[in-house]
Amino acid sequence: MSNKYSVIVFDLGNVLLPFDYKVVLHKLDLVETGLGERFAEYYKNNYEIHRRFERGELTADEFAGIVVGALDNKVTAAEFIEMYSRIFTVNDELARALPILKVNYRLVLLSNTNEIHQKHGWHDKEFLKYFDKLVLSHVVGAVKPEERIYRAVEDFTHASPGEHLYIDDIPEYVEGGKKMGWDAVQFVGNEELFAEFEKRGIKWNDGKVG
């Protein structure tokens, strides 16, 4: 076990859980040609609505109602929620490392996410059982890279900043972790992450110790 780290903090989306919004666009286009493009444009031009939902400032019903209204009620709220939630796959190779990491480190999930995605998209993923704590933006009321959401991790771990190793795919969020005094690396792929683990003396796979 590395003497430096006691906590490994993982982002969720596009790290452990790749996602693709094109799935939503395709399903909307099956309802009506061009509906997917309309959704994409609305989402892009009204991104603060998405952010408010991630902060927990909007309920699932409120968010779905806003989006469905913007789509001229071409789909129901229930249909939209189903489409909006079926965008995830699992990074199985990285997920297999979690029980090995769990032997020596506390694991924390730190995610900008929302009520719909948690409830309908990923709540039943098997790898979640290895995490000691889920720190979720819509529960905390803050989003990365805001300091408050990183503080929520430390409020749970009660560990010094330097004991945290943080993995995220978004450079801005990685920098947010570094500002806290954490060690942090940008996730660009499994091979690169495992190399970073080995540099730090972190055992991530049976038979492979850095």
Image (cartoon, rainbow, N blue to C red):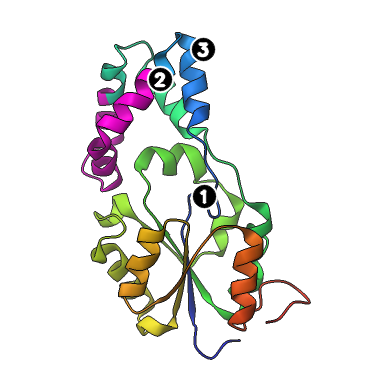
- The secondary structure making up most of the magenta span is helix
Q: Which structural element holds mark 2?
A: helix
- Please indicate whether residue 48 sits to the left or right of residue 160 in the image: left
Q: Position of residue 200 (x, y in %)?
A: 58, 82
Circle 1 Cα neighbour tier, 10 Å, few/some/many (<14 / 14–19 / ≥20):
some
Region in magenta:
37-66
Q: Going 52% across and 21% down the picture, which residue do you hit?
A: 26
Circle 3 Cα neighbour tier, 10 Å, few/some/many (<14 / 14–19 / ≥20):
few
Instruction: Find disc 2 in the rendering and name its residue.
Output: 37
Of the pair 144 and 63, the residue shown nearer to us: 144
Earlier sequence position, callout 1 versus callout 2: 1
Q: Distance between the residues labelled 1 and 2?
A: 22 Å
**What amino acid is found at the position of numbered circle 1 in the picture?**
Asn
Q: Going 51% across and 12% down the picture, which residue do you hit?
A: 30
**104 above or below 91?**
below
**200 above or below 26?**
below
Q: Going 41% across and 28% down the picture, which residue do you hit?
A: 81
- Please indicate whether residue 83 sits to the left or right of residue 159 in the image: right
